Amino acid sequence: MEMHFTDHGEAGVVTVAADRVDAAIAIRFKETFRTLVAEGETDIILDLSQVTFLDSSGLGAVVAAQKLIGPDRRLILVGLQPAVDKVMTLTRMNTVFAIHDSVADALAPEPVLRP
Amino acid sequence: MKAGRATVIARYRLRSGSGDVARVLDGIGRDLAAFDLPQSYRDDVRIVVAEVLNNIEEHAYAGVAGKLADLTLCLGAEDLVLRITDRGRAMPAAASPEGDPLIGTDLPRFDPMRMQDWPEGGFGWALVRRLATRVTYRRQGGRNRLEIVMTRPD
């Protein structure tokens, strides 16, 4: 399972270059993620657009990834494919993560709220 | 396929801890692609199979590698029936699916405001219950026998 990091200034992007995040690779996922981001201070955008399958262990690994970067850094999920989105929705874990369609959407500045 | 006549469309034998689960899920994707089933339903089947097989590896076999599980897919006009057998530890009574997907194991409860309490597991049976129509468990002949019915979409 490959994962790479790119620095976008205000956020880092971690791209998962694998088609599945499952029980067999959950531990490697967490360890590799830790290696890439533990030292930083920014939000992390997790690009899952290449991932077509995520089981509950993979979901656990994503939750662990958020815990790893701590409460002051957000883990933002992008590119959820249908089966992945389904698992996130059925488990209601889609309500605790910010989710966007793409890295570009996630990097876009927050809209200013008008009164 | 004749209406009302269910057919075994695939059989798999897996060994725990060998990467067979991923290969079987890929195989099921191909098996089901031969029939007129929407991708969404095929995803549902793979999610259910993944959770059940993972539970067998982790709980029935307690992480021991090389242990056998058998999976059969039986497709009828109305539904797909999954039958999974393993030779591991019996499912504890409190965790048994009991045959009715609306009773029993549910999603882990947690406070979203407390990140340290966000669950990293315990989702598996809740996913199966939400995607399957009926789940039946029997312990027979030293084996765990699961039968999971997944109604086909209209």
Image (cartoon, rainbow, N blue to C red):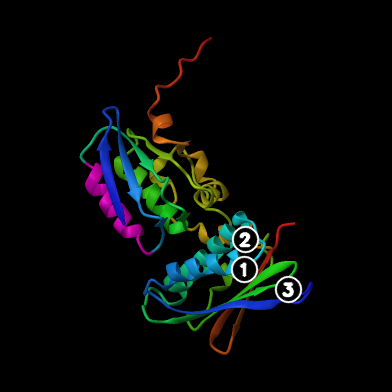
Q: Which chain carries label 3?
A: B
The secondary structure type at the circle numbered 3 is loop
Image quadrant in which the C terminus of chain B is located: bottom right
Q: Name the residue under label 1.
A: B97
- Kindly identify which numbered label has been placed on residue B1: 3
Image quadrant assignment for residue A20: bottom left
B83 relative position to B122: left or right: right
Residue at figure coordinates x 26%, y 42% from the top left: A5
Are the residues at dot 1 and dot 3 in contact (C-beta closer than 8 Å)?
Answer: no
Counting labels gives 3
| Spatial separation of the CA atoms under disc 1 and disc 2 | 8 Å
- Kindly identify which numbered label has been placed on residue B129: 2
Quick check: can you spot residue A28? yes
| Spatial separation of the CA atoms under disc 2 and disc 3 | 28 Å
Image quadrant assignment for residue A106: top left
**In the rendered image of this protein, does residue B90 appear above or below residue B133?**
below
Please tell me which of labels 1 and 2 falls first in the chain: 1
Please tell me which of labels 1 and 3 falls first in the chain: 3
